[in-house]
Image: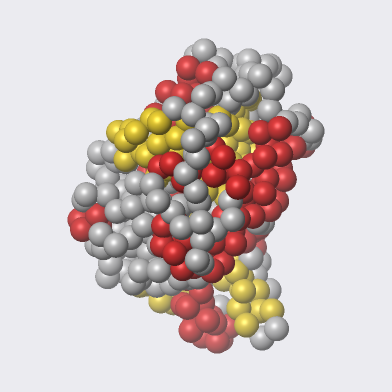
Amino acid sequence: MVIDSMGIGAMPDCREFNDTEKCNTLRNVCEFNKGLNVPNMQKMGLGNIQEFKGIEKTETPIADYGTMQEKSKGKDTTTGHWEMAGIVSEKPFATFPDGFPDELIQEFIEETNCGGVLANCPASGTAIIEKLNDEHHSTKFPIVYTSADSVYQIAVDTDLIPLETLYEWCEKAREILDNGNWNVSRVIARPYKIIDGKPVRISKDRRDYSMKPSHTVLDDVKNSGGRVIGIGKIEDIFSKSGITHAIHTGSNKEGLELTLKAVKNELDLEKIAYSDYKNGKNGDFIFTNLVDTDMLFGHRNDAEGYGKAIEEIDTYVDDIMDNMSDNDLLIITADHGCDPTVEGTDHTREYVPVLVYSKYNHGKDLGLINGFDYIAKLVKDWLNL
């Protein structure tokens, strides 16, 4: 279960990623909110990792706890999740601080017949959509923008441009980027609607079109006859590779409820199975991304909302643990930082926490772990792959 962007402190090379040493997403969110109420993750040992206001240290943690340092050269969703699945990215994905080259934009316009594009610059998604909404309506041109991450983002009002057209444009962009070896991590569909006179992004219809990863632990589980159940944007992050079942979510609450159902074996897997899935059972891997912390609060510098989102996640942790069997393992971690209290709205290059719980764990201090691929090793060992 990945709490998207809940980093716990600047990594030594953070300056190479244009980040300040002051970034510590969880600690700063705790300080801003004068403490957080997360009794379940506190019991697991979250407060034993470092000092977080309101999250006490416990003498009897029920989970193993530690800090993970990323090996890959990046601070984005794809890099973090891929490393958790066993892929260390030595070469960083390409970024475009001055916008995308004219040749790339022109090819996109020609291949999609969209007529033109607006923006073509790094921007906060909510800000650029609000700024260019009127021009978007008058021209029907998509709003194309990027960020400090390796992303090609396309925003449209789906009451003006159909959602299906937006997805087609994103698929075409992914094809152009791959064929041209642009090394762009993700194309992101950013649909929005005008609600009460303001443009509002529709989270449940967002889609990510990632580069296709090489072999991961997801493939190992699937090839062994197990089920890999992606909840949230997991199937997008892995471009469906190694996934057997998937369901998108519109909120953290929905993702948490689906995760709980999956743990309780109450999720209707037939409805979300891939067409090539062959019935078999050799251990399940439930992989959940909880994106609201990042998308709704980190990028929008909303430390209060970020704190409430963490507290909401915590309310489900005890139910998940209570419904686990003796054969189940729970891992809670993050993929990067996105500190809402420091300058800027981009991801931050941070360490991440890791909590590992089973009926057999005894509160071991894992210390500093070199590499998010520690997760892949845990999964393989647990499922005897």
Q: In this view, does 268 lie above or below 47?
A: above
Q: Which residue lies furthest to the front in this view?
A: 59
Q: In which quarter of the image is the N terminus?
A: top right
Q: Residue at x 24, y 55 (%)?
A: 14
In front here: 327 or 217?
A: 327
Q: Is residue 302 left or right of residue 369?
A: right
Count of numbered badges drawn on the protein: 0
Q: Is residue 305 above or below residue 248?
A: below
In front here: 190 or 228?
A: 228
Q: Is residue 269 left or right of residue 379?
A: right
Residue 123 location (% of width, % of height):
40, 72
Residue 82 image-quadrant placement:
top left
Residue 272 location (% of width, % of height):
72, 37
Q: Which residue is drawn at 50% across and 40% down?
A: 58
Question: Quick check: can you spot residue 329?
Answer: yes
Q: Which residue is drawn at 34% across and 33% down?
A: 367
Question: Quick check: can you spot residue 173?
Answer: no
Residue 287 location (% of width, % of height):
57, 36
Q: Is residue 144 above or below residue 41?
A: below
Q: In this view, does 67 lie to the left or right of 356?
A: left
